[in-house]
Image: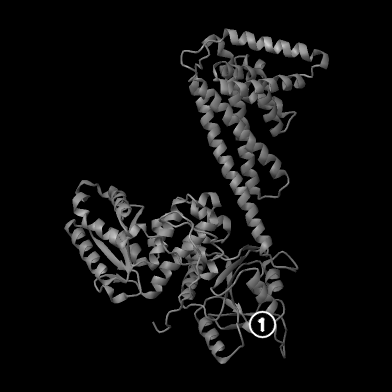
Amino acid sequence: MERVISTRMDEHTSTLFLLETLGRKYYVDNILILILTSFALEHGAWLLVLKSIFADSSEQEDINMVLKRVVSSTRTLTRKAKTDAAEFETGFCIYISLLSSTIRMPSDGWKSMESLYNLIRTMLDVTEVVRFLVIDLRSKNILRSLTDEFDDLLRLSLYWIVHGVVACSSQCNALPKNGYVIQDSQKLIYVYEKLTSVHQRLQEFKKKVEQFEDDEKIKRAYEIQNKQGRNSYYAFMALFGQPQLDRSEGSDELKLCRCDRNDMDLSVSMTLRDKMLLLLISGLDISSNEVPFLRDTYIESKTSVQQDYEIVWVPILSGRWTTSSEEKCVKLSQMMSWYMIEHPNFISENTKKFIRRVWKFKMRPIVVVIDENGDVVCRNVIHMMYIWGPKAFPFTPLRERTLWNSAETRLDSQVFDFDPNITRMLEDGKWVILYGGNDFEWSRKFTTQVRKVLSDACILAEMIYVGENIKLDPQSYSLDLRKVCYFWSRLESLLISRYRSFSAGDIGTDPILGEVKKLLSYKYAETWACLRTPSSDSMVHGLGDVMLQGFIEFEMWERDVQPKEFAKEFQNHIEQLTRGSSSSQACRHIVLHNDNRDAVESLKCPSCDHFMEKKISYGCCHIDENE
């Protein structure tokens, strides 16, 4: 290596020459070992001596131990005979002594050496991750896209590590004549920054591989057994098989019917073969709020986006089939725009047991995704559909993570874009203030104060009541109860989706999850409010007393704030008030439906950051059909 560096080639050319030469004989991981070992033998020992000479007594002992190991390793690597060992060790110690006697404290007090040591540490960090991935991926079958991504990262890592070794060697060779001061730290810093970026990308890639493995585990955990081929049709038939009831005439093959066309006895093979399937599994007590939402998502995906999948309703009957059951089934099917199993009684008890035990169906509807190959790619995507609608296609965990990582996904949009009317208000340049609770006196004070201060400031605003007591404030725009249910269901979906899309280490410090928990805790608060301005990509929200106080003090400071900075400054003001408020000291309550309890194993309180206690409560979740 030193012969290459001493030929006066520039660092890029030297790097390419070394890569080409070593690449003829060795694999990537071996090239990294060889190049770093060569650098360690040429420069590592005396760099350790530099540290030893000027280290304090506590560090010197550790460094001397390392030096002894270097002597032993060097002797082994150079294959010295046992008879030469003592002579070699003596010579090495003389070399160290001579080196020590010539070194003087550099004028910069070793500051420039930090750039060298930082680069060496980063080269080792990158090498460690690369070697782990090279060995780990040899025994795994991963997606072609991941393999291609790793190949690119591997070449990038190899180039910058070799480039780093060349740059370090050049600087080390010049140290004695330069008074042990690095003359060109910027070169080393430049390579260090490149390798730091590569290291970050390798860590992100490692997470992708782990997530891919988790996704594969999901497929295996929820797999449909006894499929006769790799196709969604075979998966569907393996699950539902032959109908449970005997038929007096015609084929005993399971049939489908089309809910919105009254088409009966449709062939499963002709209808579902080679299609992605979304199985909507529910009881006959599915809420009338959820069916229209799923229908709108389905229709939009088929018209504007033209996504190739089909929904099949799988009604799970509890108890006996009665006249009342038939009426409910007919009424629900008339609201749907997709296929359904021909009759709930044709679903066997074994299939019901599988759906409940393996797919965790309890009471609330779930949407299970089966891809074209017959693999279950997600046990329940209803949360993704609530949040992103047709954008969630093809409804895989990878797509869910991609949407969360997209620059277009902002929490303020996810919270406020549940109603087209609210979206139009923001597009028209209006401030939108959501508020809720059942305290009539607070509501009267809050709405009066907000309208006064915003009117005085010539700011157009809409106040929207989100709650069950619609008559609380006739002057405000009130959401109907179906929209209120959708608002809170969407927030719960945001919590579950965010929780399952990221690792446990990321969840604890995730700011988006923290905001969602606060918002969801307002559902059972006495009073609360949330503000979004058209010029900001953030929200300002808090409990009722704090938000009221914030608007009372609005006139004291808003004149000095630029419009674009208002939301940020108001948020800071609300946070200050929150810290001093007695209500902020009370811990929050977050209520999840029982079916979602397993999806979120544990949560920390958004106020005090302690783990929240799980409790059980009972409540009716239906709205009167006449409303």
Specify few, some or many for label 1: CA neighbours under 10 Å numbering under 14, 14-19, or 20 or more. some
Residue 182 in percent (x, y) is at 51, 17
Q: Is residue 588 left or right of residue 559?
A: right
The quarter holding residue 393 reads bottom right
Q: Nearer the viewer, residue 546 or 311?
A: 546
- Give the camera-side residue of 204 and 268: 204
Looking at the rendered structure, the number of numbered marks drawn on it comes to 1
Residue at screen point 66% across, 61% down? 219
Residue 58 lies, in percent from the top left, at: 57, 23
Q: Is residue 268 visible?
A: no
* Residue occupying image coordinates x 65% and y 16%: 2
Kindly state the secondary structure of the residue where label 1 is placed: helix
- Indicate the quadrant containing the N terminus: top left, top right, bottom left or bottom right: top right
Q: Residue at x 53, y 32 (%)?
A: 194
Amino acid type, mark 1 = Phe
Residue at image location 65% in from the left, 45% down from the top: 147
Q: Is residue 20 above or below residue 464?
A: above
Using the image as rendered, state which of residue 39 and residue 518 is in the foreground. Answer: 518
- Residue 244's x, y, as percent? 70, 83
Q: Is residue 427 left or right of residue 12?
A: left
Q: Can residue 69 be seen?
A: yes
Q: Is residue 269 left or right of residue 618?
A: right
134 over 33 or under it: above or below: below
Q: Badge 1 is on which residue? A: 346
Q: Quadrant of residue 248?
A: bottom right
As drawn, 611 above or below 147 = below
**Outermost residue to the left:** 456
